[in-house]
Amino acid sequence: MPINNYAVQPTEGSYVSGLEASVYITSSDPTIHQSITNRKLDIITLEFTETQEKLPIYGYKSEEWDTVLRGEKLVQGTFSLNMKSALQLTKNLGGTVYSRVPNAITNLPLAKHADVKGFDYWYGSESTEYTDLFGNLVLRDRPVFTQRKQIPKISFDIKLVYSSVKMKLFSMNFSNPEEEDIVNEYMPFLYSKSITIKNVMVNSIQQSIAPDGSPIGEFYSFIGKNVIEKSETPKVIREN
Amino acid sequence: MYFSGNDVEVWISNSSYSELLDAVSVQFSINHPTSPVYSPGDRQFQTQMIGTKLIHGSLSLNYKEGTNLLALVDKGFSELGIYYRKTAYDDTVIKGRRYRGVGEYTAETSYFLKGIEITARQHVVTPNAENIVNNYQFIARSFVGDLVEETLELDINDINTA
């Protein structure tokens, strides 16, 4: 007999833990590699702080503040990944940390192109290069954190999703008007809620290597614009 | 009678409605500095200048549906109430005779932090089964505390049978 309506019993809310958390990266930016968007990331920890500056204003002879001025809002945080390849996330995000010398230098007469350890560097003079004991080309005063001619506006969203299945009371009314009985039954419900950190930009990357068998971790710190929370309506998990 | 964290409820309220918070921890500090004023040649200060008061604190809430402290504060819920209530049973002496465990002692008090403003929220996810909590930092405008009220209730039936 078909179910014509159902009502989710009011719930007092359910707790979540880190075991129910999944982290995704979402973005509409075409420069972000598609292999990384809308996929669950292998994230170990995620931590963020949303700060809203507030300045209490005291009037003349006031011991307690009279009003509060609102300042800037900023989201700062860190997340860590188990390393699979070097700077895996950064490369897929468009290489915001490793970048090239401005193209203007390449117009110099002695400009050459060298491939150093997998990264493309442009340099402007013969005098800036030498080889080390192993024959590797080393650039003197080589740029590490340089600017591109056009700094791409690469930002993405971090979506943290908590989803859990819990048994809840499920009320069913049947379409037959003669049968007005309401059947209450415990059924599995899927609860999900999400926290989205909007307009995230990676600031720095740190790698931690310990002399043991633990996986190498990469720690990313980021800033974001704001945080949006969303709770989905609980859904019944039906058997086919 | 001493209070513990098990005896505490944390509420947030506006002028007409209160909501119980699923608080894990709460702490606050009240800073009201005074500066001593010395007259010329004095070794001890003559008076004190009272400065401005500011209350800082932090509050940790279990993260679950319907718990958004930022939204509540934006809607005008700006009073944080911390209620302490403890009930214990103890011996009672009536007319020189000791009755064992028939006295129900209740002690209660409360603190109110008024003019709450949230300044930061922290959310940490780690791969373990502990509850996710939101840590809030706040400032408040004023602090009101009640004196501890202690009451004693006696069960006559217990006294008769004791």
Image (cartoon, rainbow, N blue to C red):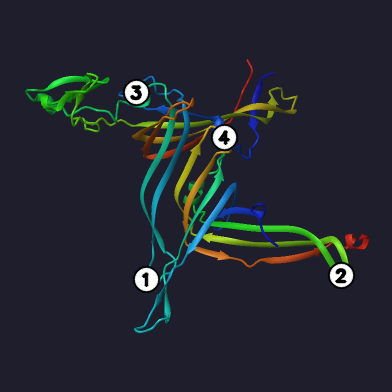
Tell me the residue that label 4 is attached to.
A17
Helix, strand or loop at mark 2: strand
Marks 2,3: beta carbons within 8 A: no
* Distance from Cα at disc 1 to Cα at disc 3: 56 Å
Which kind of residue does numbered mark 3 sit on? Asn
Residue A123 location in percent, x, y? 15, 26
Tell me the residue that label 1 is attached to.
A60
**Farthest residue, direction bottom:** B41
Tell me the residue that label 3 is attached to.
A92
Which kind of residue does numbered mark 4 sit on? Ser
Tell me the residue that label 2 is attached to.
B94
Q: Residue at x 19, y 20 (%)?
A: A114
Left or right relative to A170: residue A221: left
Count the numbered circles shown: 4
* Distance from Cα at disc 4 to Cα at disc 2: 53 Å
**Lower position in the chain sequence, tag 1 or tag 4:** 4
Helix, strand or loop at mark 4: loop
- Quarter of the image holding residue B1? bottom right
Residue B121 location in percent, x, y? 46, 46
